[in-house]
Image (cartoon, coloured by chain):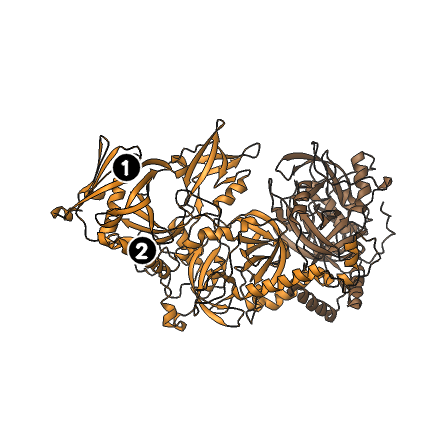
Chain colours: A brown, B orange
Amino acid sequence: MKHHALHLQKLLQSSAWFSRNGIFRSGLAWLMSICFLLGGPQLLPAADDEMIAEVQPKLVKIFGAGGLRNLYSYNTGFLISSEGHIATIWNHVLDQNTVTVILHDGRRYEGKVLGAEPGLDLAIVKIEETQLEHFEIGDPSSGSTFPLAAPGTRIVAFSNMFKVATGDEPVSVIQGVIAARTKLPTRRGAYESSFPGEVYVIDAITNNPGAGGGIVTTVDGRLLGMIGKEVKNADLNTWVNYAIPISHLQQAMTEIMTGNFRSSKNTDDEKKTAGRVPLFHSTDFGIVMLPNVVPRTPAYVDRILPGSAAEVAGLKPNDLILFVGDELVQSCGEFLDQIGRLESGGKVKLIVRRENVLITSELPIPRKSRPPAKPLR
Amino acid sequence: MPCAIRFDSCRSFLMVIALMSLAFPQLAIRAFANQIDDANTPLSKEAQDAGQPQTEQIPGIVKEAEQKRIQMIREVSPAVVAIFSSSGDGGGSGVLISPDGFALSNFHVTSGAGNFMKCGLNDGKLYDAVIVGIDPTGDVALIQLQGRNDFPFARMGNSDLLKPGDAVFAMGNPFLLATDFTPTITAGIVSGLHRYQYPAGTFLEYADCIQTDASINPGNSGGPLFNLQGELIGINGRGSFEKRGRVNSGAGYAISINQIRYFLGHLKSGRIVDHATLGATVRSGSSREVLVDQVVEGSSAWNAGLREGDEIVTFAGRPMGSVNQFKNVLGIFPKGWSLPMVYRRDGQKQEILVELAALHTDTELMEFASGGAARPSEKPGQPKPGQPKPDQPEPGDKPTPQEPPLEGHSEKPAEKLSPELKKLFQSKAGFTNYHFNQREQKRLISHLASLSGWRGATGLWKFAGDDAKGTSLSLILSPDGAGMQWGETPFLQPSAGANWIDEPPSSGGFLAAMLHWKWLLTEGPEAFSDVYYLGTQPLDGQLGDALSTPLYDALVLSKTGATMTVFFREDGVIAGFDFKASRDQPTCNVRFSSWGTLGGHPFPQVLKVSSSGRSFGEFTLKTFEQKSSTSSEATR
C-alpha cells in the first residue's frame, strides 16, 4: 500500500500524472472505480451540527459579474473581521465595481473590492457593517500562525456551490478528508490555477461552481483553507478539488486589511497574467488583434500576417475569437492571456465567429523555451 | 442546473464507470491518504494520528459506531428495491414501506418503466410490480410489489428533525449495477435542509428537500435516504451536475419523507396527484418580508380576506422569511388541503384558513402522465371507457413542452403479463391505476354498513334540537327539498331542478348539504353519478407536525354538479363531510362532533357547520320523526 501511495503522490507532483500510457491509466481507472463503488469517502462519524451552526454565520454569499453560459456569477466568501472584511476567491465574479454580499441571516450589502493578490487567487471585499461574527486571522508577524494540516485530516467544507442557498439559507456543507498536500503543476499549463504553493487536495467534491472562496475547516470548526477555483486538467479532463491553506493567505489578508498591501493594479488583464510571463504572443501565430484599448475590448482579429499559421488555418480579419482550446475568451486581454499560457509544441484549437457562423480551426504551436519565471511574493 | 437522474441504458454502464473514474481521481488518492507519510507540522493529535500509518489504535468507540452502522445497513438493505422496466432498458431504485409490498420511487423512474415493472430485492429474487399512483410535480411514485404479504420494509423517520451534518446513507441501484439486486450504499452528511430546487416547467419540483453529499448518481433515483438510525428520511432523485457530466458532483437532493407522508394517502388512491397554488403570488419586501403581490379574485385566499400588500407572517405554522420558504410550504402539500396562515396588515395580525387550489388542470396532468408513461393496454388516441369528461382533449402521446426528455420508455407488449397481474391495472382518465381506487372505495364503502338501517327510508325526516346558545331549531329533509327553522327565521331549499343555493346564507349551502347526506344514507353511493377515493387529508387546517397530523380518508361523491366529500376516521367512523354545490361556490363544512341514535339508527348528533373558515353554527339534534315516502319521491 505504501508503495502505491508514494507512487500516486509522485504522480500528482510530476508529469507522470499526465502520462498517456494507456495500460497504466486503465489500471488507475479501475482502482478509482473500486474506491468509488466501495462507498466513496467518509467512513467516520458525521460532522457536529453545533460546530456547523457556529461556522455558518461567518460565511457569505457573493453575487457579481458573469451569468453567461458556463460562467457563473456567484462566489462564496468568509468574514475575517468584525467590520466586514471578507476574503474570497479572485475571479471574474469580482469584475465589476461592486458586488452583492448576503450574510447568513439574509442581510444584503454592497461590497467593494478592497484589494486583491492575483498570485494567491485572493481578494478582500469590504462591506460597511460592524460587530460581525468572523474568523480571527491575526498578524503573522506577531507570531499568530495557522498550522498546516496533514493528509488524512478530516475536514468539513462550507460553500455556496451551485448557488443552492439564497437569502438567509445556510450554505452547503460537505465532508471529506485531506488526501494530499501538494503543488498543482501550473507549469505544465494544464491547470489554470495561478496559485504556486502547496494546496490541500481533498477527496470530496469541494470545487464546484460558486464554491470558490468557501472554506475548509477541521471537524471542530477551525479554519484550514480557502476553497480554490475550479481547476481542470486538460489532458485527462478531470477536476481537482483543493483548498489554499490559510497560512499562505494570512499575510496578504492582513496587509490588504490594514492598507499596507502593495497592490497590483486590478485590471482585467493584469490579474490574469500576474505572476506569469507569457510564452507566446498572438503574432507568433500570425494574428494581429485590434488594439486592446479598453478593459473589455472584444477579441476581434485586425489582420492576418501573410504566410503565417493563421493564414494557413484560414483565419480572416474581423473574426471574433471565442474559444482558445476549451477556454471561453471574453476580451482581447483574455485571448492574449490564453495564448500566453500555451505550451510549446502541439496544436491549439481556436473557435471564431464569422458572420454568425462558428468556425473551428487548429494551429500548430511553435517550439519556444520559457524565460525564467519571476519569483512570486 | 439540477437535473432529474434516471438511468436509461445498461449499455452505457462501462462508459460511465470510465468517466466516473476520470472524474474522481481524488478518491483513489484518498484511499491511500492514511499511508502518505508526510513530514508536516501536525495540526492536532487527531491529525497526526491520521497522518501516520494506521496501527491498532482505533478507539473502541469508533469500532462500535462502525459495527452499529454495519448492522443498520444489514437491517435496511432488504427493503431497498432495484427497479427495472419490464423491457430491461432502464430503471432506478425504490424502497418498500409496507409488508404488503407498497414501495416509493420517483415519478421519473416509473414513467419510463411502464405500468408493470420488475423489482429486485437483496434476497436475489425478482418480483413483479404494478404502478399505483403518481405525483408528477413532486416526482414521487408509489408502486406495489406482488407475491408476498411479508415484504421487508423501511420505517419512516421524521425528516424535520434532521440537522446539517447528520450522517445519511443513500441506497439504491446506481448505474444499474445491482445485477444480484443488492443495493449500493453511499455515505454522506446532510449538506443543507429546506432547499428549494426549481421545477422543469411546473413538474419535478423539489420543494423543502434535503441536500446531501452522499453520492447520488443515475440509477439512484427513487431510492431511499436513511439516517444513522436506519429510518427512511427521503427519496433521492436529483443532483446538481452542470459541466461535470451526469455523475455525482457533491450535491444530491432527496424529497423529504415528511412531504411524502402528506401525499401517501393520495398516492394510494391510484390517482394522478396534483400539487397546489395559493391563488396569490408573493414577492420579497425590502426587509426580506414576504408580501402578497396579487390575489386571484374568488380564490380561497381572496374569500378569506387576503389582499395585495399583506405581509405573510406564518404559513402552515412556519415563519416566512423568504419567497423560497413560502414555496417550500406550498410545495409539500397536496391540492385541496386547508392550511392556516397568519398575515399582517396595518400592524394587525389576522389568522385565516386557505384551501389550496390545483396547480394544474386535469388535462395538463393527464397529458404529462400519459406522455411519460407507457400504457401497454391502450393506444393513445383511442377513446377510453368510462371517461367522465368527453370534452377533454385526449391525452396525447407527445411530451408536454415543459417536461425534460424522458427517453427510453418501453412499449411492452401486453401478452407477457399473467392474467393475475393484468387484473391489477385498470386505466381510467385522471387515474394512474383505477384498480387501486376501486379497492379503496370498497374499503370505505364497507364502513357505511353500520348505517344500512337508513336504507330505503326516503320519506320525510324531521329533526328538532337547538344550537349552542339554546336557540331552537327544526330541520326537515323531504323528497321535495329541505327546510329549516332556526329561532324565528325560516330557510328553504327546494330539490327540484337541483338548483343548490347558499341557504341559510353564509352556510355554504347547509340545507343542500344535508339533502345529499340523506341520499347517501337512504340510497347509498349508487345514488351518485361519480364516486372516487381522494386519499387522506387533515380536517379544517388542523396540522400538527408531519407525524402527528390526524389524517382522514376522503371519499368524493358527485351528483348533479354538486360534490360531497365524506371523511372517515381511521376506525371507519365518519367525522363529517364537505359539500360544494358547484365549483365556484364556497364549501359547506359539516363536522360530526358526536354520534348518537335517532329513529333507532346511528346518526350524527352534534353538527358543527362552517364555511370559508368561519363558523356558522353548532346544532344538536335531539328528536327525530319520519313520515313514509309518498308520490313526491318521484320528483327528486
Q: Residue furthest left?
A: B631
Numbered label attached to residue B225: none
User: Which residue is nearer to you in this view: A345 or A311?
Assistant: A345
Quarter of the rendering containing residue B322:
top right
Image-quadrant location for residue A299:
top right
Q: Secondary structure at mark 1?
A: loop
Whether A21 is drawn above or below A136: the answer is: below
Q: Which percent across, then down, holds residue B465?
A: 24, 38
Give the x, y percent position of residue B434.
36, 59
Residue B430: tell me if it is visible: yes
Residue occupying image coordinates x 12% and y 47% = B630
Q: Which residue is mark 2?
A: B447
Q: Report which residue position mark 1 lands on.
A: B502
The type of residue carrying mark 2 is His
Q: Do residues under tags 1 and 2 come within 8 Å of each other at their CB atoms? A: no
**SS of the residue at dot 2?**
helix
What amino acid type should be assigned to the residue bearing mark 1? Asp
Q: How many marks?
A: 2
Using residue A10 as the reference point, say whether residue A61 is left or right of it.
left
The image shows residue B118 at horizontal and vertical percentages of: 47, 68
Q: Closer to the observer: label 1 or label 2?
A: 2
